[in-house]
């Protein structure tokens, strides 16, 4: 007998970065739900209101586009073959690739910025990576620089190498924004930033206990990026190791990600492979009322949009990568 699983929001948030068993059938019902049947004969129902919506046009955006999709199976399998060394976090084991959190992870996972975001988020969601882990704690010291430096003034109250406290993190974010020095934070989805800025410390502390682990992961990722320029090599290697270790246990038995393209009345099952987003399946809300020609035309348009997103993301990524290495070599 087939299993019927109703997905509510509290469960759905944990299904964005997982494997698909293979979609046998996907339907958009009149009750505003997506019905999915997987190859293992399991049935799932997704509420349209709780899925990610986008209205990106065919001419596309010339800026970076982030879509919350699962990681594609082959990409994860490749990461699972990457050697993970979590025991030798000493200075002798530090390489040039561990000079920044970006270079450390990019050299390990490949891909572009969206791969960086997805893998980092997954490691935080699953608690492999913890921003207040012992290796992230700053040593206690009464030492003060003379003359007083700007970095010391900004971090003297931090107990960790990233600002764990919400007030301190938001303060550092606003300083960086005022100095036009947000770096990769400029490419973090706006909804992540809004969540970070609107969350009080008391709310943040409760997120692990009220089914908001995914929200906490988004905030913790921003805190890592906010404090990225203060990270030591040991902390960077710790973060890289935990991200790779989380990939080894990446879930294999749950749903694909579905994105709603509002301007096409389309539900698009998508995944992220090594080169970018890929479309796995498309269904339309008005499927029964459109001609085969209209249906094919919409599918072609959506394919073009996804290809354009991948192209622009790649261009933006290459520009930033070139700028990163140019600035690094000039230091």
Image (cartoon, helix red, strand yellow):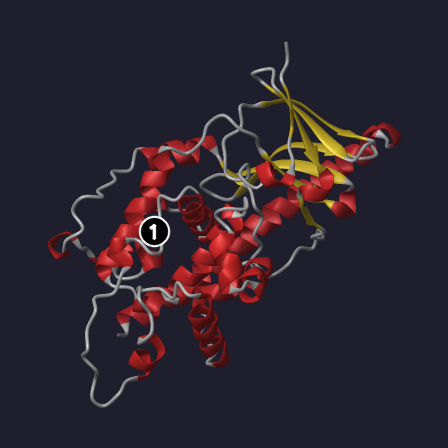
Residue toward you, 33 or 83: 33
Q: Position of residue 9 (x, y in %)?
A: 63, 40
Does residue 155 appear left or right of residue 205 in this picture? Answer: left
* Residue at figure coordinates x 31%, y 52% from the top left: 239
* Circle 1: element type: helix
Relative vertical location of residue 32 with respect to residue 225 in this rendering, above or below: above
Foreground: 219 or 274? 219
Residue 250: name its quadrant.
Answer: top left
In this view, which residue lies farthest toward the bottom? 147
Q: How many marks?
A: 1
- Locate residue 156 relative to residue 73 in the image: left or right: left
| Residue at the spot of label 1 | 105
**Residue most toward the top?**
1
Q: Is residue 314 visible?
A: no
> Residue at coordinates 51% horizontally, 51% vertically from top-left?
207
- Residue drawn at x 43%, y 74% as measured from the top left: 172
């Amino acid at each position: 007998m087939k299993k019927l699983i109703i997905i509510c929001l509290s469960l759905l948030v944990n299904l964005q970065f997982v494997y698909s068993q293979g979609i046998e059938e996907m339907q958009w019902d009149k009750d505003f739900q997506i019905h999915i049947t997987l190859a293992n004969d399991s049935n799932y129902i997704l509420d349209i209101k709780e899925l990610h919506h986008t209205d990106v046009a065919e001419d596309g955006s010339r800026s970076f586009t982030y879509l919350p999709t699962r990681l594609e199976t082959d990409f994860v399998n490749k990461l699972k073959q990457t050697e993970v060394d979590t025991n030798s976090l000493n200075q002798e084991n530090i390489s040039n690739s561990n000079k920044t959190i970006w270079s450390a992870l990019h050299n390990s996972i490949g891909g572009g910025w969206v791969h960086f975001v997805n893998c980092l988020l997954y490691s935080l969601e699953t608690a492999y990576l913890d921003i207040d882990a012992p290796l992230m704690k700053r040593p206690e010291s009464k030492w003060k620089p003379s003359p007083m430096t700007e970095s010391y003034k900004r971090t003297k109250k931090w107990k960790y190498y990233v600002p764990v406290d919400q007030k301190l993190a938001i303060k550092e974010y606003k300083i960086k924004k005022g100095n036009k020095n947000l770096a990769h934070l400029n490419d973090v989805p706006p909804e992540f930033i809004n969540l970070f800025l609107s969350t009080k410390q008391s709310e943040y502390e409760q997120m692990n206990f009220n089914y908001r682990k995914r929200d906490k992961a988004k905030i913790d990722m921003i805190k890592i990026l906010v404090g990225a320029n203060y990270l030591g090599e040991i902390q960077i290697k710790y973060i890289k190791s935990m991200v790779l270790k989380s990939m080894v246990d990446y879930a294999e038995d749950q749903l694909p990600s579905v994105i709603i393209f509002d301007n096409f009345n389309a539900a698009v099952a998508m995944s992220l492979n090594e080169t970018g987003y890929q479309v796995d399946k498309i269904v339309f809300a008005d499927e029964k009322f459109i001609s085969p020609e209209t249906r094919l035309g919409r599918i072609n348009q959506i394919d073009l949009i996804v290809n354009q997103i991948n192209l622009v993301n790649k261009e933006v990524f290459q520009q930033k990568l070139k700028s990163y290495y140019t600035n690094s070599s000039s230091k």
